[in-house]
Image (tube, helix red, strand yellow):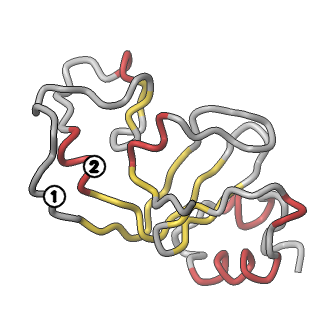
């Protein structure tokens, strides 16, 4: 099953290697989809613990009024998920998060991703990210 990356998924995604939650998300491109028949009220909160759109735990949002309808309409087209605990990073390519264990990842594809978006990716990932980075040419 292919899952596109909605901000809401950050409420359940963890690093597949070290299990750190939440992951840091950096969005390079996103798209908006128009859904005409959304079946919940504007006041209903969809996330249980972590708001991916605001990148904060719900308990830390204070007076921020959440707009979950707006959130589910947006999807990340290209971006990166970063685990601050183990240093791994996971590309989001054409709305699909590539969250595979190291041995199943494609080194050439991952390095091409790093090169393509090098101006948008933190230096720490470019130089020291796992399983590979641009310093390990």
Q: Earlier in the sequence, mark 2 or mark 1?
A: 1
Q: Of the numbered discs in the image, which one, if any, rests on residue 35?
A: 1
Task: Determine whether 23 is above or below 100 in the image.
Answer: above
The residue tagged with tag 1: helix, strand or loop? loop
Q: Position of residue 16 (x, y in %)?
A: 74, 44
> CB atoms at circles 2 and 1 under 8 Å apart?
yes
Instruction: Report whether 125 appears left or right of 7.
Output: right
Q: Residue at x 15, y 46 (%)?
A: 38
Residue of label 2: 72
Q: Residue at x 26, y 17 (%)?
A: 62
Residue placed at 54% from the left, 72% from the top?
Answer: 93
**Percent from the top left, x then y, of residue 128?**
80, 59
For the residues labelled 2 and 1, the Cα–Cα distance comes to 9 Å
Task: Give the class, few, some or many, for how many residues have Cα within 10 Å of label 1's Cα (few <14, many ≥20).
Answer: few
Image quarter in which the N terminus is found: bottom right
Horizontally, residue 127 falls left or right of residue 75, namely right
Position of the C terminus, as image quadrant, is bottom right
């Amino acid at each position: 099953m292919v899952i596109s990356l909605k901000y809401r998924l950050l409420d359940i995604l963890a690093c597949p290697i070290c299990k750190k939650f939440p992951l840091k998300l950096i969005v390079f491109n996103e798209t908006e989809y128009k859904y005409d028949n959304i079946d919940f009220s504007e006041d209903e909160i969809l996330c249980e613990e972590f708001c991916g759109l605001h990148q904060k735990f719900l308990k830390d949002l204070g007076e921020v009024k959440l707009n979950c309808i707006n959130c589910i309409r947006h999807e990340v087209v290209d971006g990166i998920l970063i685990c601050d605990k183990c240093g791994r990073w996971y590309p989001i390519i054409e709305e699909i998060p590539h969250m595979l264990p190291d041995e199943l990842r494609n080194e050439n594809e991952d390095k091409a991703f790093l090169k393509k978006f090098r101006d948008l990716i933190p230096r720490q990932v470019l130089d020291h990210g796992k399983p590979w980075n641009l310093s390990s040419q």
